[in-house]
Image (tube, grey):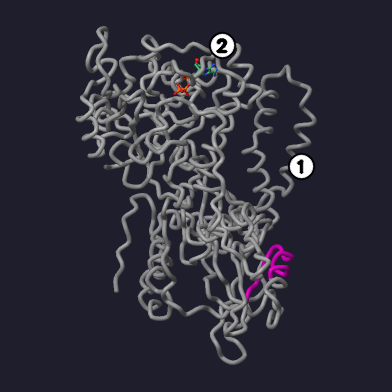
Amino acid sequence: MPVNLPLYPHVKIDTDAQKLLVALPTLESRLPNKEPEIHYLRRFLRNRNLHLVLRIYRQFKAQAGSRKPAADFAVSQAADVYCEIRYRIEDAEVRELLGLLSKPHVQALLFCHDKVACEDYEPRFDPVPPGTGEDGTIVKIVRLIKNNEPLGATIYLNEHTGCVEIARVLHGGAAHRSGLLAAGDEVHEINGESVKGLEPDRIVEMLSEVSGSVTLKLVPCMKTNVGRKTKLKMRCLFTFDPDTDEHIPCREAGLAFKMGDILEIVSDEDPTWWQAQRFPSSETAPGPGAVMSPAGLVPSRHYQESVEVMRRVKLREAKHPPLVCPFFLGSISPCRYSPKIPRQKRLRKTMYHIVQSGVFSEYDTDEIPTYEEVELYRPIHPLKIFRPIIFIGPPGVGRNELKRRLKASNPQHFEEVVPYTSREKRPHEEDGKEYNFLSREEMESQIISQKFVEYGEYKNNLYGTSLDSIKSVIQRGKVCLLAPHTQALKFIRTPELRPYIIFIKSPSLDRMKVTRTERRARSTSGDATPPLSVSEGRQMSFERRDSNLQAEEMRDIVEMSSKMEDRYRHLFDSVIINDDLETAATELLGLAARLEREPQWVPVGWAYS
Ligand SMILES: Nc1ncnc2c1ncn2[C@@H]1O[C@H](COP(=O)(O)OP(=O)(O)OP(=O)(O)O)[C@@H](O)[C@H]1O
């Protein structure tokens, strides 16, 4: 069958590559996994660079006889010259030569020159042994060059056949790049030594001991269905360290990551251990030349869920061990004992304890955070649709202070949401400015129809933030700023709003005391506390805070900050530690600016909704 090569205007098509291309269809029937392999070969043989290399090779060969190198020690000669002239720097030509000789590219060129002159070409292969086993089985002889990097494959003992097999080939590793090993291949010999009857650990040891050329005798796996390969991008919602996981099949092959890192899952064939590569930084989305980490093993979603369930069960048992009843000698289920719920030392009177009082709600308590599928979102300025910035943190940590400062940096661009209330309008107030005023009945009916992302009651009046108000700010081309209660996140963290969530974290208690005392930070508890955390700035002129933040309150803030971070960290896009106020505000302004120009990872479905 004639195969038309694509036209490369300046490259002469190599005739041998052309012949191989034409012969490809005859190979098709002999390959076990034909479609991808033929496709790969066809692309390889049509590659423009291959034709260029072959052309250079032919020209080099044709002229090799006439071009003998004058010497094969250019590197040492250059070093001698350098030492000889290095003190004569008053001469401009000498300075130029010194500059040239110290350039890494020139040194590398001289090094290559010597290698070619000495005909020192790596690797040197021994003759290839025959391609069939003693009993006539087809075997494949694979030769790889192993440097310092591991082979990039894991093995296991197939208990049915008693053979050691390749369990998985790690994406991007040496074995994968060679394209010669496949999961399911039986390993029979390593460098001519039979591995029959050896434990997998011993084989791993043998492989780690060899360096340079490694010859493997394998019985190839004939399975055509090699399983599903994926290219899913996932944000890690937990931290993983292969060194502390006792079940990982090969510790060295594990890929460590921390919460917030972005992984590309390159294979999810194995239900327990996926293969993944890590993007260089989770803060910024990858540029065109992003260098990914080599692929490694990471827990699959299912595996991680089971590990977490077990961990929680153990934790619960440690806290409330099953009681042994002396009469029945049986264990009594801990469920029958309701553990005492510790009460908060001091009841904050801020409004946003909402209906289900307490900072931690049912939200996400049953869900086990593992991975979240993400995609790249590029801000589009002509549309003037900006992601709302959401400030989460324990009351009193400084969310509103930072929000205020961000707004003040560009009041035309950033906008807060006007909250709703059922209380009477005061004479100096204007509807829609400080609050949107509604009757209690109207507000209750809107609450029932889920129009509010958060709401609460204070001194017999309802207060709330409506979803429509947030949308209206976004639609007017402004960056919406909001400091809601964590419970509101379930209504806000949607593809429609695409919020960017910043956790305002407390510094250490010592730093809290220093910074808050210095600035005479005001208390957020007490009778004079304004009812809404929303639009705090607006209320300051109408409501009064009459006491400085007390040491006990600071301790509460620090404790709550750490609990909130533990519980909700997986929902935060960024964390700002509100230690020195100026530093935290500068960090916030920088973040807000980057948000409008740099691509970001967002949950899948958000980017184009
Ligand atoms: N880094 C900081 N250093 C010193 N004082 C700060 C800092 N951040 C905030 N403050 C002060 O702490 C007090 C509480 O801050 P803020 O009102 O912003 O807290 P909040 O998290 O919004 O809590 P709430 O919703 O209860 O008002 C304010 O007086 C504020 O000026």
Pick the quarter of the image with the N terminus: bottom left
Residue 440 sits in quarter: top left
Foreground pick, 464 / 97:
464
Q: Image point 61% across, 73% down: which residue? A: 156
Q: Image height check: is 608 above or below 557? A: below
Inspect the magenta stretch and tell me whether residue 216 lies in it: yes
Q: Residue furthest top?
A: 428
Residue 253 in view, yes or no: yes
Q: Image height check: is 533 above or below 213? A: above
Q: Secondary structure at mark 2?
A: loop
Foreground pick, 268 / 542:
542
Residue 296 in view, yes or no: no
Tell me the amino acid under the disc marked 1.
Ser
Residue 356 sits in quarter: top left
The spot of residue 210 in percent (x, y) is 72, 66
Q: Is residue 138 left or right of residue 2?
A: right
Q: Secondary structure at mark 1?
A: helix
Q: Residue furthest bottom?
A: 135
| Numbered range of the magenta stretch | 204-217
Tell me the amino acid under the disc marked 2.
Arg
Q: Image height check: is 336 above or below 351? A: below
Q: Image height check: is 191 above or below 267? A: below
The tag earlier along the polypeptide, 1 or 2, is 1
The spot of residue 89 in percent (x, y) is 73, 20
Foreground pick, 106 / 65:
106
Q: Say if mark 1 contacts mark 2, CB within 8 Å.
A: no
Q: Would you name the residue on which mark 2 appears?
A: 519
